[in-house]
Image (tube, rainbow, N blue to C red):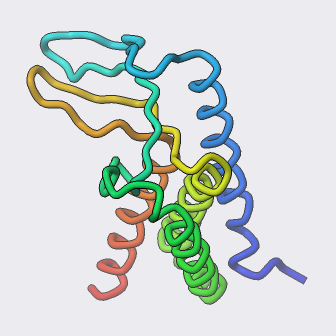
Amino acid sequence: MPLAPSRRWIWLIIVVVLLDQGTKRLAVGLLEPDRPMIILASGALPSIDFLLSYNKGVSFSFLRLAGDAQRWPLVGLSLLACGLLAWWLRRVPARQSILATGLALIIGGALGNMLDRARIGSVVDFVHLSYRAWSFAIFNVADTAITLGAIATVISLMLEAA
């Protein structure tokens, strides 16, 4: 009996969570807060550095100043969102692999950040992009997976509507 379409994507969710948690563990072990490790510095290209940060907010440091009161509501919201997305993923036809990929990336990223929030009360972020005077929020693998998943989901829905 072939696997249900949603089971084909469980591996991607697991890989995202493991990659996210593994890179965060490395960042915590190798970096000190507020002491950047420059990875790529160039005047012509965006700069990339690793900068350890603990984010109490949501993706890309949004709402980071709201305090610890949001910890458990955000854990609950993450679990609810993952449950709803998993329900949707289970119903995605096999031919809609872009949509399934997008949903799996979002679920994996949300679970990765939720694990941090439940365990330590904040999300470990460590990737910082900047270009000259412009500085982007500090983020992590989970944030990247959520963003790429959202893009894939929107693209899939647009292609389906066309």
Q: Is residue 81 visible?
A: yes
Q: How many marks?
A: 0
- Rendered position, 99 above or below 35: below
Q: In the image shown, does 151 or 35 lie closer to the viewer? A: 35
> x%, y% of residue 110?
54, 61
Going by the picture, which residue comes out furthest to the right?
A: 1
Q: Is residue 94 visible?
A: no
Quadrant of residue 43 within the rendered picture: top left
Left or right side of 89 for 124: left
Q: In the image shown, does 100 or 31 lie closer to the viewer? A: 31
Left or right side of 59 for 161: left
Q: In the image shown, does 103 or 162 lie closer to the viewer? A: 103
Going by the picture, which residue comes out furthest to the left?
A: 133
Residue at 57%, 50% in the rendered image: 121
Instruction: Give the quarter of the figure containing the C terminus.
Output: bottom left
Quadrant of residue 160 within the rendered picture: bottom left
Residue at 45%, 62% in the rendered image: 149
Residue at 13%, 14% in the rendered image: 44
Residue at 60%, 26% in the rendered image: 28
Instruction: Give the quarter of the figure containing the N terminus.
Output: bottom right
- Rendered position, 57 above or below 4: above
Q: In the image shown, does 11 or 37 lie closer to the viewer? A: 37
> x%, y% of residue 157?
36, 80
> x%, y% of residue 112?
61, 53
> x%, y% of residue 68?
47, 56
